[in-house]
Image (spheres, grey):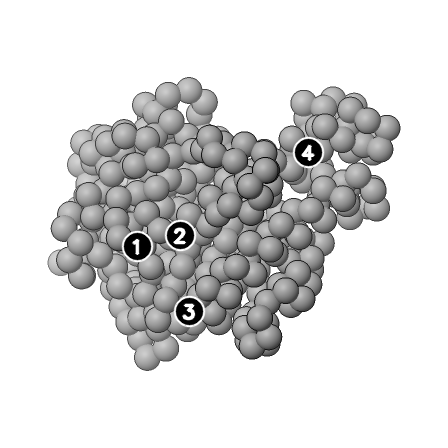
Amino acid sequence: MRASYAIGLDVGGTRIAAGLVERKGRIVRETRMSTPKGGPFGVVDAIIDVIGEVATGVHPSEIAGIGIGLPAQIDFGRQTVEFCTNLPLAGVDMRGLVMSRTKHSVTIDNDGNAAALGESRFGAAKGARDFVMVTLGTGVGGGVFIDGQLYRGHRGLGGEIGHMVVDLEGPECPCGARGHLEAFVARPAIIRDATAAAATFRGAGILRAAGDDKDKITAEIVVAAANAGDEAAAEIMGRVGQILGEALVGIVNLLNPDIILLGGKVAREPLVSRLVREKVGRDLLPEPAQAVEIKPAQLGTDGVVLGAVGLVLYDLFKPSRNSAVMITNGENGAER
């Protein structure tokens, strides 16, 4: 008898979300908590806590396994965390640690890949064979579908859109290099620029919106101030839209996708998405500019949770007439 459920997790730099998902893809129970600060074992403890919460009352035999989306470069075949910018997880055996404490099989993947998987089956990219997803949060994630399959690259490390170089003289990225997209458009970058503006007369509106406390400035405050007509905030968010659009021009010219999905609250803001569309429409080569559709992702956090569950409940992502998704085994890379 097949197990009825799987558990999916979205582990981010600021929060962890988990969902208990039935075989047809319905999330029947979910929870979330702030990502703990400190070392990797605190993150593992938090993962165990949210798994326990969503699995309450469910017999272990009813759970097929656990899928986890991490904001990290994952060697998918080896199931190892190779690099992680915003959490101290590089080199940590996340799969083994969670598996040893839950006694369930565990599969890990990059969170951008998981989000793209979720959107391909249940969200805004349903039926699309060629699309790219970009998510703005604590970092910048990405997922690439080519000919109906999630593209991971040689070792499963592909899709790191946030670490594309957009300015050789740009600010330092959290990864240590300079000029990466993430250093311009992720939440910490927005807060950095807004905090600098708040120290000047032009940024007084941003500071007021944060209760005159620069340490309370958030990306949401900057977006709200921009929408309310604050000049400094509008300039910051305008730069986010322009730079993100510039990066997408290169992606579309290279891959010619049918759809670009924008995930994360900041990317879905009309102010940002409008500027992105204008930049792409203006600077793309003519034919791709006519063909690509830029639209918001639909599933939010649920997209990563559902995509992570798809690493476990393979029948959720069986190829259909309109789309094909290949899920590979975390142990040996064999097709499932």
Please name the amino acid that badge 2 sits on: Gly
Sequence-first tag of 1 and 2: 1
Write down the residue under mark 2.
159
Q: CA distance from mark 2 to mark 4?
A: 26 Å
Sequence-first tag of 1 and 3: 3
Q: CA distance from mark 1 to mark 2?
A: 8 Å
Whether residue 4 is visible, yes or no, is no
Q: Quadrant of the C terminus?
A: bottom left
* Tag 4 secondary structure: helix
- Label 1 close to label 2 by CB (< 8 Å): yes
Judge left or right: residue 47 versus residue 106. Answer: right
Binning the other alpha carbons within 10 Å of mark 4 as few (below 14), some (14 to 19) or many (20 upward) gives some
Binning the other alpha carbons within 10 Å of mark 2 as few (below 14), some (14 to 19) or many (20 upward) gives many
Sequence-first tag of 4 and 1: 1
Judge left or right: residue 215 versus residue 264. Answer: right
5 shown above or below 12? below
Binning the other alpha carbons within 10 Å of mark 1 as few (below 14), some (14 to 19) or many (20 upward) gives few
Q: CA distance from mark 2 to mark 3?
A: 14 Å
Write down the residue under mark 3.
130
Write down the residue under mark 1.
153
Which residue is the extreme one toward the top? 38
172 shown above or below 228? above
Please name the amino acid that badge 1 sits on: Gly
Please name the amino acid that badge 3 sits on: Asp
